[in-house]
Image (cartoon, grey):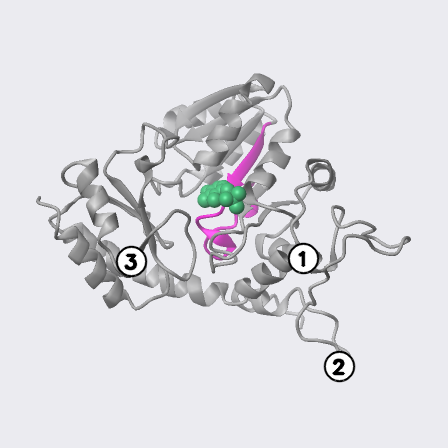
Amino acid sequence: MSQAQDPSTLVVSLGRPARSPDSPLNTPIVPASSFIAGGEWGYARYGNPTVDALEQTLGVLEGGTAVAFSSGMGAAHAIVDSFDGARILLTRPGYAGVQHLMTKHSPRFELTRIEANDHDALRAAAAEHDLVWLESPTNPLVEEVPLADIAEITHAHDGVLVVDNTFATPLLQRPLSFGADYVLHSVTKMLSGHSDLMLGAVVATDPDRINELREARIVLGAAPSAFDAYLALRGMRTLALRVERAQESARILADRLREHPAVRRLRYPGFGSMLAIEVHGTPADADQVCAHTELWANATSLGGVESLLERRRAWEHEDQLVPETLIRLSVGIEHVDDLWNDLSNALNRVQS
Ligand SMILES: *Cc1c(COP(=O)(O)O)cnc(C)c1O
């Protein structure tokens, strides 16, 4: 076909074996640590055909070349590894694991953290750093950061921009098209979509950066398993359907939550399937809400077919900028009325 296909088609059609009589429709799981010498893989930390199929699919969706890792954190670590001694700008609050990685390793580079919602400070600081690391929408406050602006400022000063695109997925936002140099994914979340594996990826376009990422995977030992790559690709086949459904439900839930007397503040960027609410009362009241849903599960993580909620500050390492009564909601694909009935019942326990 000569015309460019829609991402909802590509996510179904890519990463499959060449068509010949009796070739399988799906990429086989190749559980090999070692390959006969003389080919492109050799050893599974360097590459694997099942992992290749996942990388090919995600690379096209984001508009670059993907390198897969055993987790999103493995992928994040691989990027950071290339920036020893650099001045790094990181927005906060953000995904707690990345914040921890950066603050723990900060002696290796100069780290500045700036509040993600202070866009003026962010623009000013972007001009003075070698590496700018953004999430948009952010975790867990679901705030949008002006990606295109920051990309322009960063590049005008020869800086490099990383965008964590885990929340939006390439169906809703393609950071490379805004000028990002690296796109980070926790494939564990929305992309794979079934809360049954851990996997990460980085997508880039510069061949030197792609080689550095592959090298980092080899030396960090953060290679994904063929089985997990297979599951991730299988999950991605329904990405467009899941995103569409969850996004529509999130929109409806946002409208209803805004009116609920127990909700002090709703945070919703207007797209995607992540929401956050602050409830009236104390952290214990918020815990009561999380403890009394029957359909929504009180569990960490996000982006699965099943709806999850959690009070983020229940985690010791969560940023102090995150309100104590904030509950993060990951909307799944259950019927929106069932989700609402369950959630509003639990919220009714909170006195406004
Ligand atoms: C989960 C997550 C990560 C880390 O990914 P893992 O697969 O858990 O290692 C990074 N960024 C964001 C935004 C995440 O939600």
From the image, tell me which residue sits under label 3. Answer: 251
The type of residue carrying mark 3 is: Arg
Label 2: state its secondary structure: loop
Q: Which residues are magenta?
A: 159-179
Residue 181: x percent and y percent?
A: 60, 39
Q: CB under 8 Å between callouts 1 and 3?
A: no
Q: Position of residue 281 (x, y in %)?
A: 14, 38
**Depth check, front residue: 312 or 40:** 312
Residue under pointer 2? 22
Q: Helix, strand, or loop for circle 3?
A: helix
Q: Nearer the viewer, mark 3 or mark 2?
A: 2
Would you say residue 343 is visible in this rendering? yes
Hey, which quadrant is residue 343 in on the image? Answer: bottom left
Q: Quick check: can you spot residue 181?
A: no
- Residue at 64% in and 23% down: 84
The numbered disc on residue 226 is 1
Looking at the image, which is closer to me, 150 or 140? 140
Q: Residue furthest bottom?
A: 21
What whole-number distance in Å separates the C-alpha atoms at marks 1 and 3?
36 Å
Image quadrant in which you'd find residue 323: top left
**Residue 245 percent location from the top left of the image:** 37, 65
